[in-house]
Image (cartoon, coloured by chain):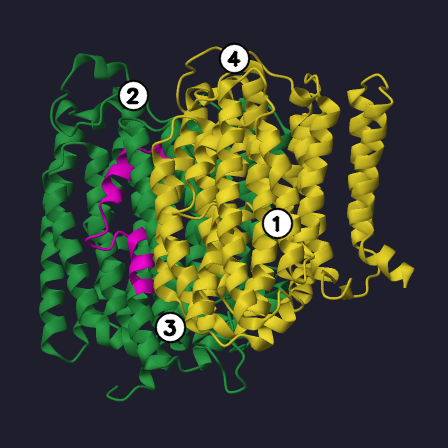
Amino acid sequence: MTEQYFSGLRIELFLTMLILALLVGKVLAIKQNPIGTLTLISVFLISSIGISFMQNESGYLFGTMFRTNSTILFEKAILLAGTFIVFMLGFEWMKKQKHFLEFCMLLLSTLLGMCFMISSGNFLMFFLGLELATIPLAALASFDLDEKKSSEAGMKLILSSAFASAILLFGISFIYGTTGSVSFDTIASAIDGNNVQKFGFICILTGFAFKISAVPFHFWTADVYEGAPVAITSYLSVVSKGAAIFVLMPVLYHAFGRMSSTYIPALILLSTVTIITGNLFALRQKSMKRFLAFSTVTQAGYLLLGITGNNTEAGASVVYFMLIYIFSNLGAFTVVSILQNRTGRDDIGVYKGLYKTNPTLSMVLLLALFSLAGIPPAAGFFGKLFLLSSAAGAGYYVAVIIASVNMVVSLYYYLNIVKMMFVDEPEITIEKLKPAVTEQISLFICCCGILVIGFIPAIYEYIYNLSAAI
Amino acid sequence: MNLSFLILIPFLTLLALLAGNGAQFSRMIAAVGMTIQLGLSVFLAFAYCAERTAGNTTTMLFQTEVSWFKPLGINYHVGVDGISIAMILLTAIVMLAGVLISWNIEKMTKEFFILFMLLGAGAFGFFMSLDLFALFFFFELAVIPKYLLIAIWGSGRKEFFAMKLALMLMAGSALALVGIFGIHFNSAAADGTMSWNLIEIGKVHIPIAAQRLFFPLTFIGFGVISALFPFHTWAPDGHSSAPTAASMFLAGISMKLGGYGCLRVAIYLMPEAAKEYAPIIITLAVIGILYGAFATVKQTDLKYMNAYSSVSHCGFVILGIGMLTKTAATGAVLQMVSHGLMTALFFAVIGMVYDRSHTRIGAQMGGLLKVIPFIGTAFIISGLCSLGLPGLSGFVAEMNVLTGAFEVNSMYPRIITLLAACSLVVTSVYILRMTGLVMLGPLKKEEFRNFKDARWTERLASYILIVAIIGMGVLPFWLSGMISDSMGGIFDNLHLLAGN
């Protein structure tokens, strides 16, 4: 019995141990040693990724509270990998912070919360995980103590999250009231799709839409992304969004499986509106972080579209896309972080003529943007195509046409950045920047991910075989 | 022969370029790579003919199939028939000529050739793919590098035109993508499995309702890239602002991707819808032909002139495909090859003239044949080929299209064909006038006397293209025979229909 708990909770236990170790270090007031801490965290994270692939039994723990299976473990591995890259790309900034250890602890606690969230087998657990994931994030967003904007970002994040959580909880209460349960399994068999349940469902979906910043619940995104430290922005855009999407799938397919006639139109509407609005806003951004914020809004739209497909294919394409998306988006953010750290500027003017002085950084950003835009041979091409193919397979061709025409719009703004780097004359003189070792690691991992994932057939096959269990 | 080599060699050249440094090294590597590629393509053509004479009647030869995304049934699957061979030969010739013409590029030489190789890999892959997904992958691969080629090395309002081109082509490919999805998800065979494999889908009957829906998407999607009227507006601007080699690739190969896609994907897989939509297609084609021809007459810029004439000539490709007869479609493929060679030569020559005179306005030049006889001769040859002089490739192609089009036994296509034939007169007007203006007559300016004739790389590139043009004009039969034999596969579907 105990063994089962250890095995099912192994990643969560690992993370808790790590957080406790950092806490002990803090309490004993050991002299702050950023490199040592980073090494410790990296070792823990990488070994957690390793153990997530170990032999696994699927099933429930604590009644129906905690669900575990190979898919969930793989999703956790994706989030862990994302967090690892975030640590790498943000380390140069983190190590200068007075409260470095607290920063790490908070970041790891949100990750822990997300792990519980995607493992949740009922709404109670889900809500607990969600709160554990959200509240530290608000603290993290306001971590840049010298920046007014950073505090603003934290404030906005906590207010909008609280609002979203409230609506979510409101929706859950309706579902609980009509089905008598918070467990996904019981809900699945008790739900009949009456109007009260529909209302509850819409509230729950709204809560999710806040988390993945789908339009019209995206207003916090740009401001928070702009104000928060780059490490947190990238974490929000990838890991946090990934967790929300990963948990949305079982909620829809399991708990609300019988209500597919309600949730599919809702999702299609949400996704097309999100894609169009995200694109239109991204067109006019002058700040790189805001630009990437709206680009992630658009990507969320594509993810939502992918979810509408046939369950197994949709699940596989979403997980596959997230895997690729981690590398593409974090690759872009690494370059943004390096430039912002060295020049102190975030507007897109900095990128003008970057290729002349920093060819490597420009090439990485080019690859990352192409991957986000879905241009071969970057892996994003495959990711995006499978999302569309999953929706097309279910017959939603109109949405697919809207989405694929919007890929053209997004190409415009991605190419604009590329043009600035390769064609325009520099606005300010940037000397040749030398990325720190951690940043180099992050750049290297992201590039490899972007270039390689599409050409290794085994990866998709592995994900596909898993995704039957979503 | 393993076809993957044809994708591998541009790719390996690209890697070698990445590893190396220095402008001269990059040029040499690119030239060596493309020479090997041309050699391989010629060898492939011979190997193909040998197989056919040995009596191998499989639709697609030299197939290789490797599983790519197994759960979705996506494979890397290549194979060739006569049409692919013709296009591969064209691509190999234009690529080599493009590399030679770009010899004097000094700005970011290495990057230029890397992008050029990427384009080449995309085009080769596209012409060989038998899997719809892989086909689309290579199609997209051959689109975006053009943006960078034009935006970085181009001239004039290059950023704007590059963006226009990239967005319009991407919009086309977005439509084609939806069409491809539609084809795939309606390709359920008797046992319910859906396929990406072109040959397998060709055996399945796609429901007519689905065909009506997805044929226009696919055809327009691929049509955009072959300058189907009214989606041609990217072509003149894109061509004229591109650097010489990119113009050559763009007009010579890239526009053919569209024609090939229309034929291989849209017509082949959705024959019934093709029949229904044929009147619209040929109407658009003839508007493109006439509009392009008349627009060319008004041009003063040589590159714009050739670009608009490309719109007109590519109209013949669409016309030939839209007539849905074997002869016309063979003519369409011949026109793709012929126009590819001819326009590549024309752009190369215009590039050479521009390098010397620093102007592309025809009226500012004059009498150039006296000072640069080689370039002048090449100019006149490409012009004559464009107006369809017998003995050169243009004549063979357009003759095939027009006779084939006239075979259709109904009134409307015949009127359309007559109209299209009228454009030949307009073509001779602009070609002869431009030749007279630029090459003949007295020398306009004294400084023209200092012009040096073509360098060896330019000569070599021109020779390769001219030999191909004349070869195709004098001995068209082996090529047209190869193509029309392979048309059987495509048109069998069509002839099964009632009324044929």
Tell me, by letter, which chain the rendering colours yellow: A
> Are callouts 3 and 2 both on one chain?
yes
Q: Which mark is residue B268?
A: 3
Q: Report the amino acid beneath label 2.
A: Arg
Tag 1 residue: A243
Q: Which mark is residue B356?
A: 2
Q: Look at the image and say whether residue A135 sits in the magenta stretch.
A: no
Mark 1 or 2: in front is: 1
Q: Which residues are magenta?
A: B217-246
Q: Report the amino acid beneath label 3.
A: Tyr
Most foreground residue, A216 or A447: A216
Residue name at image x 53 percent, y 66 percent:
A175
Residue name at image x 41 percent, y 43 percent:
B464
Tag 4 residue: A430
x, y (%) of residue B40?
56, 52
State how far apart marks 3 and 2 are (Cα). 47 Å
Answer left or right for B166 relative to A190.
Answer: left
Mark 4 or 1: in front is: 1
